Image (cartoon, rainbow, N blue to C red):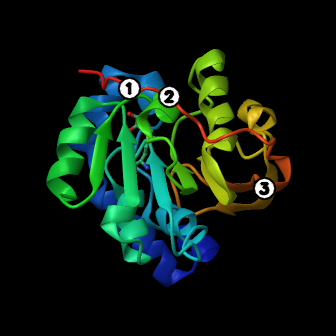
Amino acid sequence: MAQRVLGLGRARRVSGYLKKMVPGAFLQEFFAQPGIVGAICPSSPFLAHRMAREVSHIKDGLIIELGPGTGVVTKALLKQGVAPERLLVLEYSNRFVQRLRRQFPLVNIVHGNAADLCRIVPAGTKVSAIVSSLPLCSLPEPLMQSIVQQWRELLHDSGVAVQFTYNLHRPAWHKHVQGVQTGSSIVWGNLPPARVSTFSFHTHKLSSPHHEHPPAEHPG
Ligand SMILES: C[S@@+](CC[C@H](N)C(=O)[O-])C[C@H]1O[C@@H](n2cnc3c(N)ncnc32)[C@H](O)[C@@H]1O
């Protein structure tokens, strides 16, 4: 059945992904804090590739990844040619942070909360993209709002934000993103299927000065 829907090659790759999923680290973290992890298995390489492709045309400025978990999207970003020094990866779970630092020694892996993003990014930094795997649908609404509202403030004029969601219809966080949706597509080769949405901010920019905040303390 899966072979008929996805085609033989793709069905094989999906089943390879299911076999290679990282149940150890990911499931442990899921059972420890289900609302924060927000998924029972990591993103598939198909989903990671679709997200990374959305920012592959951006050749300068900082790319911020939020909620990298096991690093599938980080790996896809590097594979798309993003230089490790152009990445700032922000993860809340200490277990994932330790794992990511071993896996990507050249990438700046920050242990912190996406709600503190404006304080974490040094003032005056040109931020070109935010690529987020945060479980916005399962985070408390005030936290979710505070996170997505910082994106417009941080992103450079031509910057983009990319977010995936398992809610294939209009999820609640959508209305809080103060940007224009410029792309949306469903990745069926993921468990469960996910929608990738891309937002652009330049037409919505108020004439606010660059953010200036004191450096944030990292948790843990
Ligand atoms: C759906 S999982 C990420 C899946 C990831 N793409 C993977 O394949 O492993 C969501 C991630 O967001 C992280 N997270 C949740 N809330 C966060 C917050 N406020 N700040 C930073 N990271 C957060 C979780 O710890 C988890 O790693």
Helix, strand or loop at label 3? It is helix
Among numbered discs 1 and 3, the one appearing first in the sequence: 3
Assign the N terminus to one quadrant of the image: bottom right
Q: Residue furthest left?
A: 102
Q: Which residue is mark 1?
A: 216
Residue 10, compared with residue 142, is above or below; it is below
Assign the C terminus to one quadrant of the image: top left
Could you tell me the amino acid type at mark 1? Ala
Q: Which residue is mark 2?
A: 213
Q: Position of residue 53 (x, y in %)?
A: 56, 72
Density class for disc 3 (Cα within 10 Å; few <14, some 14-19, many ≥20) is some
What is the CA distance from the residue labelled 1 to the residue labelled 2? 8 Å
What is the CA distance from the residue labelled 1 to the residue labelled 3? 27 Å
Name the residue located 45 percent from the left edge and 50 percent from the top edge.
65
Name the residue located 43 percent from the left edge and 67 percent from the top edge.
77
Name the residue located 19 percent from the left edge and 45 percent from the top edge.
99
Density class for disc 2 (Cα within 10 Å; few <14, some 14-19, many ≥20) is some
Front one among 190 and 100: 100
Q: Quadrant of ligand 1?
A: top left
Density class for disc 1 (Cα within 10 Å; few <14, some 14-19, many ≥20) is some
Could you tell me the amino acid type at mark 3? His
Q: Is residue 140 left or right of residue 26?
A: right
Tell me, yes or no, if residue 195 can be seen here: no
Q: Position of residue 172 (x, y in %)?
A: 75, 30
Tell me, yes or no, if residue 124 can be seen here: yes
User: In front of the other: label 3 or label 2?
Assistant: 2
Q: Does the CB distance between marks 1 and 2 fall below 8 Å?
A: yes
Among numbered discs 3 and 2, the one appearing first in the sequence: 3
Front one among 62 and 165: 62
Q: Position of residue 3 (x, y in %)?
A: 54, 74
Q: Which residue is mark 3?
A: 202
